[in-house]
């Protein structure tokens, strides 16, 4: 159904997979197909929304973010998800950004995700 959405599409919260998944899992493959179309982006934000292992490593979500940053750097965005609705205690924005930067890898990919892609998508 999402493949038929006209215009640009942004998937929030790393797809918010609520169960264990891997980059080659069927649910994650659906996200990858959307990204392959070229008019879809995914926000690599709020790992606490779907992580079962929890802070600060979000070890079950980190491999997905690393995969997306490596294979789809032109389709990824980052957001803080501040005010962190319905999350108590509130996570540290600094810790979340540090976690994301670690997952994103090199400086070129970080710049793409943090600066270039939002500029392109939102017309900043």
Image (cartoon, grey):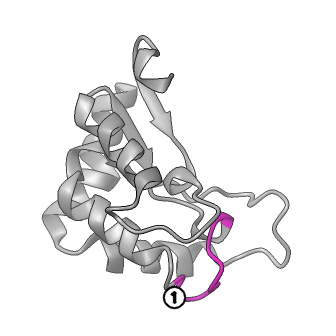
Q: Is residue 54 left or right of residue 74?
A: right
Tell me the crowding category of disc 1: few under 14, some 14 to 19, or many 20 or more residues within 10 angstroms, Cα based. Answer: some
Viewer-nearest residue: 86 or 62: 62
Q: Which residues are magenta?
A: 49-58
Residue 12 percent location from the top left of the image = 55, 46
Q: Main secondary structure of the magenta part?
A: loop
Query: Is residue 124 in sight in this rendering?
Result: no
Left or right? Give the position of 104 relative to 91.
Answer: left
- Residue 67 coordinates in the image, percent (x, y): 28, 66
Quadrant, the C terminus: top left
| Residue 31 point in image, percent of width and height | 40, 44
**What residue is shown at x 40% (from left), y 28% (from top)?**
122
**Element type at mark 1:** loop
Please, is residue 40 above or below residue 106 in the view?
Answer: above
Image-quadrant location for residue 4: top left
Which residue is at the far front?
26
Residue in the foreground of this view, choosing between 63 and 94: 63
Q: Is residue 27 above or below residue 98?
A: above
Residue at the (29%, 43%) spot, across then down: 75
Q: Quadrant of residue 95?
A: bottom right
Q: Is residue 88 above or below residue 16?
A: below
Q: Is residue 73 magenta?
A: no
Q: Provide the residue designation for mark 1.
A: 57
Q: How many marks?
A: 1
Q: Nearer the viewer, residue 122 or 31?
A: 31
Q: In this rendering, does residue 78 appear at all?
A: yes
> For the point 43% across and 76% down, which residue is it?
62
Image spot of residue 37 (x, y percent): 25, 29
Residue toward you, 80 or 87: 87
């Amino acid at each position: 159904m999402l493949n038929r959405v006209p215009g640009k599409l942004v998937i929030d919260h790393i797809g918010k997979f609520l169960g264990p998944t891997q980059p080659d899992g069927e649910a994650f493959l659906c996200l990858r197909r959307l990204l392959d179309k070229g008019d879809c982006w995914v926000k690599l934000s709020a790992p606490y929304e779907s992580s079962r292992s929890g802070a600060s490593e979000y070890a079950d979500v980190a491999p997905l973010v690393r995969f997306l940053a490596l294979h789809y750097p032109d389709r990824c965005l980052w957001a803080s998800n501040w005010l962190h609705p319905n999350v108590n205690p509130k996570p540290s924005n600094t810790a979340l950004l540090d976690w994301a930067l670690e997952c994103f890898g090199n400086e070129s990919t970080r710049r793409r995700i943090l600066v270039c892609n939002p500029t392109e998508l939102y017309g900043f």
